[in-house]
Amino acid sequence: MRKELYLERHPENPIISPSMMDGADAMMNGCPFVHDGKIKILQPIIFSGREFPQMHICESDDGVHFKINEKPFIKFEKNPESPLFHLDRWLIDPRITQIGDDYYIMRPGDSYLGTVAILGKTNDWIKYEHIEVISLPMNRVPCLFPAKFGGEFLRIDRPSGRNEGNLWLSRSPDLIYWGRHRHLLNPWTHWGRKKIGPCVPIKTDEGWLVLVHGVNDSCAGSRYCLTAILLDLEKPEKIIGMMKSSILSPERDYEFIGHVPNVVFACAAIPDFGKDELKLYYGATDTCMCLATGSLSRIIGACKKSE
């Protein structure tokens, strides 16, 4: 079995699995964040016999062993008068960005006309506040930068059009109205030629580190891997580094066998600059959550060297 060059899987993987909660059928791709000094994960869960997933908060003292809150943090909107009634039917793939004391959550809305992006926020992880539907179809969950540029918010988009999987940048004065759209990047790797998708950007001294998943099709179906790019700190529309190889690809049984085989997928990662460590919490086969760690500077260096 090939050894990964950049990340080491935790020996207790999977760290979050359906067996941890009664009735759970799948733990989809969750998003990690830090709150009150602890690593937590906003975890989409599919339950047997229930039509729609819902999102629960998982909490850990050591970043490895998690406890799942039985009360859902975001669930299907049952009110037919709500603007989310037709959108909250597939609660998956959240991306969380902290700005000040607020945590902004961008997630897909499963419209009958295509996937839109929904924005909400919280500051205590007790109460969730819906803000607005912030994109037209098809836009598969933008990722918000944790900073402003020229007084404006910035996000990475993954719209679909003539080419399905390109990355774009969009700006907004208020997080609701988005414009000044600029193309950023096309799929560029031999193992991710079909489409690419972003994680929440991480600010480092060297630039904005953005983990990216790449998808490729073959006679065996789709295969999801992870890589990284580096954007300029002041002008993030400028790409200053991009890897050619993957930092993680399906290699273990739990990354092959599940609801969607041959998939590793991340929404965000947690940096520890003091330890020069990147904690990558990733979904495997749309069934469980896993952890891999590696040197932050090694991955940044690989971006700059185009390894």
Image (spheres, rainbow, N blue to C red):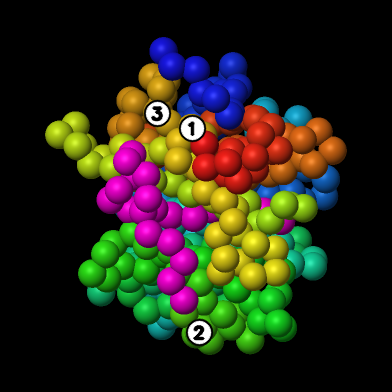
Amino acid type at circle 3 is Pro
* Residue drawn 73% across the image and 34% down it: 277
Quadrant of res 104? bottom right
* Residue drawn 32% across the image and 41% down it: 190
Looking at the rendered structure, which numbered label has been put on residue 204?
none
Quadrant of res 264? top left
Question: How far apart are the two marked residues, 2 and 3, measured between alpha carbons?
Answer: 37 Å
Asked if residue 275 lies in the magenta stretch, the reply is no
Q: Label 3: how many residues lie within 10 Å, few (<14), some (14-19) or many (20+)?
A: some
Amino acid type at circle 2 is Arg
Residue 96 location (% of width, % of height): 61, 58
Secondary structure of the residue carrying numbered label 1: loop
Where 45 falls versus 235 (above or below)? above
Where 195 falls versus 281 (above or below)? below
Where 206 falls versus 78 (above or below)? above
Residue with the mark numbered 2:
180
Residue situated in front as seen by the camera: 174 or 43: 174
Whether residue 228 is visible:
no
Whether residue 163 is visible:
yes
Q: Hey, which residue is sitting farthest left in the picture?
A: 219
Residue with the mark numbered 3:
250
Quadrant of res 161? bottom left
Q: Label 2: how many residues lie within 10 Å, few (<14), some (14-19) or many (20+)?
A: few
Amino acid type at circle 1 is Leu
Q: Are marks 2 and 1 in contact (CB under 8 Å)?
A: no
Residue with the mark numbered 1:
248
